[in-house]
Amino acid sequence: ANLQGKMTRSSADPVVINEETIQLVPDAIMKIHGEVTIGMDVMKVNGIPLLVTISTTLHFAALFELKDMGTDTTVVAITKMVNIYKARGFKIVGIVADNGFKPLKTNEAFTALQIPLNITSEDEHEPFSERLIRSIKERSRMVFATTPFKKIPRRMTIELVKCQEYW
């Protein structure tokens, strides 16, 4: 009884994530939603580019920080996104994006992924990702308004925006 509250807490064993700890998606869901179409766009927050992706049927959103707006950087982020879906057993049957992603059609690394890329016409936007971007920006503004700061650092901005994708 004398030691309660006076000892340091012992740390728990770290969680190891490997193929055995990943839970598979139930067969009923995979049968209906196993093939996924992705909508994507680039969102800028305070000049920081973020790749926004959303699956049209699952409505699973993912944000990836882009170091620059280059095609190679975008392909690295798309590859990360593809690997997330593949780890759970989903198959990406197509990506829908606006006209800004046209250079991906000639990029060797992207064509190696063997995912069809559907580009919208010149003056159109991809509706799923555009709606998600509006929602994320609105939520981010709301959270930032509750902070006592006038400015926040770049990393904090990125993490604040990334937290809004899970709402």
Image (cartoon, rainbow, N blue to C red):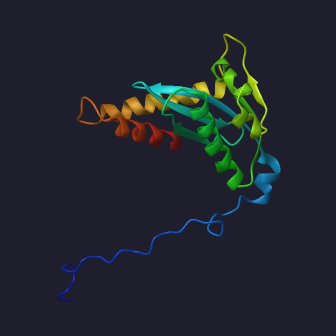
Task: Estimate the x, y position of residue 35 in percent, counting from the top left.
Answer: 79, 44
Residue at horizontal 67%, vertical 31%? 39
Outermost residue on the top side: it is 123
**Can you say whether 125 is above or below 1 in the image?**
above
Figure quadrant of residue 155: top left
Q: Position of residue 67 (x, y in %)?
A: 48, 33
Residue 4 lies, in percent from the top left, at 22, 83
Q: Nearer the viewer, residue 103 or 164?
A: 103
The answer to whether residue 14 is seen in the rendering is yes
Q: Residue at x 67, y 18 (%)?
A: 99
Q: Residue at x 51, y 34 (%)?
A: 66
Left or right, residue 23 beside residue 158:
right
Is 107 positioned to the left or the right of 50 in the image? right
Instruction: Name the residue rendered at 70%, 37% in the picture.
Output: 109
* Relative image position of residue 134 (x, y in whole percent): 52, 25
Residue extending farthest front:
108
Q: Which of the 4 image quarters holds residue 13?
A: bottom left
Q: Nearer the viewer, residue 30 or 87?
A: 87
**What quarter of the picture does the N terminus occupy?**
bottom left
Number of numbered markers: 0
Vertical arrangement, residue 14 with respect to residue 143, above or below: below
Residue 56 in sight in this render: no
Which residue appears farthest toward the bottom when viewing the image? 1
Judged left or right of residue 35, residue 50 is left
Give above or below for 13 relative to 62.
Answer: below
Which residue ends up furthest to the right in the rendered image? 31
